[in-house]
Image (cartoon, helix red, strand yellow):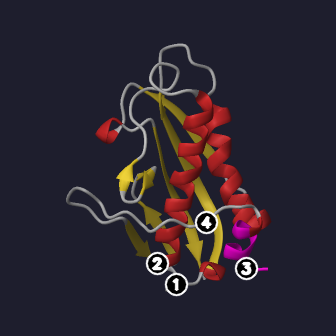
Amino acid sequence: MDPESRLRDAGLILPEPGRPAFDYEPYKLHNGIVYLAGQLAKEDGEIAAFGKVDRDIDEAEASRQMQICALQALNWMKHAAGGDLNRIDGILQLRCYVACTEGFDGISRIADHASGVFTTAFGDAGKHPRSVLGMMQLPRNAPVMIDLQAAIR
């Protein structure tokens, strides 16, 4: 089964990729590795929630936003792979960022929602090393963001 079918079976649909709001490229492909810029949770091209987790939005909404970041990343990976997610050979590294209050201890639980998207799409090839960072603030006052590297065959 192909990655998009696996995602659909799990009730996940790829959104339209949101274009960068500033002067940078959403990804770079070099020697079979795609390097993704930071992916914010955009719905209909706009950031869907703002502020810090545990103050402005709750953990459940932040988890949903993290899942949207991962789906957004998949769209750019698909673009980098010539429109075919089957060409993704694996996720090499994932970094998850959570803007949160001091002392909030749920950043890894929130990051699991991004990781889950990649393992749903790619099975074992979607398993990856990961870093999770709690931040004071993220671009455009978004609560969550990811970036990653993936291998393309």
**Disc assigned to residue 13:** 4
Residue at left offset 57%, top offset 36%: 61
Q: Amino acid at mark 1?
A: Gly
The crowd level at tag 1 (other Cα within 10 Å; few <14, some 14-19, many 20+) is: few
Can residue 135 be seen from the camera position used here? yes
Up-down relation of residue 52 to residue 36 (above or below): above
The crowd level at tag 4 (other Cα within 10 Å; few <14, some 14-19, many 20+) is: some
SS of the residue under disc 4: loop
How far, Cα to Cα, is label 3 from label 1?
13 Å
**Disc assigned to residue 2:** 3
Residue under label 1, please give it.
83
The image quadrant where one finds the C terminus is bottom right
Q: Amino acid at mark 4?
A: Ile
Q: Amino acid at mark 2?
A: His
Q: Tell me where residue 28 appears, x and y as whole percent.
A: 38, 70
Lower position in the chain sequence, tag 2 or tag 4: 4
SS of the residue under disc 3: loop
How far, Cα to Cα, is label 4 from label 1?
15 Å
Residue at left offset 48%, top offset 24%: 100
Residue under label 2, please give it.
79
Residue at left offset 59%, top offset 44%: 64
Q: Tell me where residue 147 appears, x and y as whole percent.
A: 47, 52
Residue at left offset 46%, top offset 78%: 79
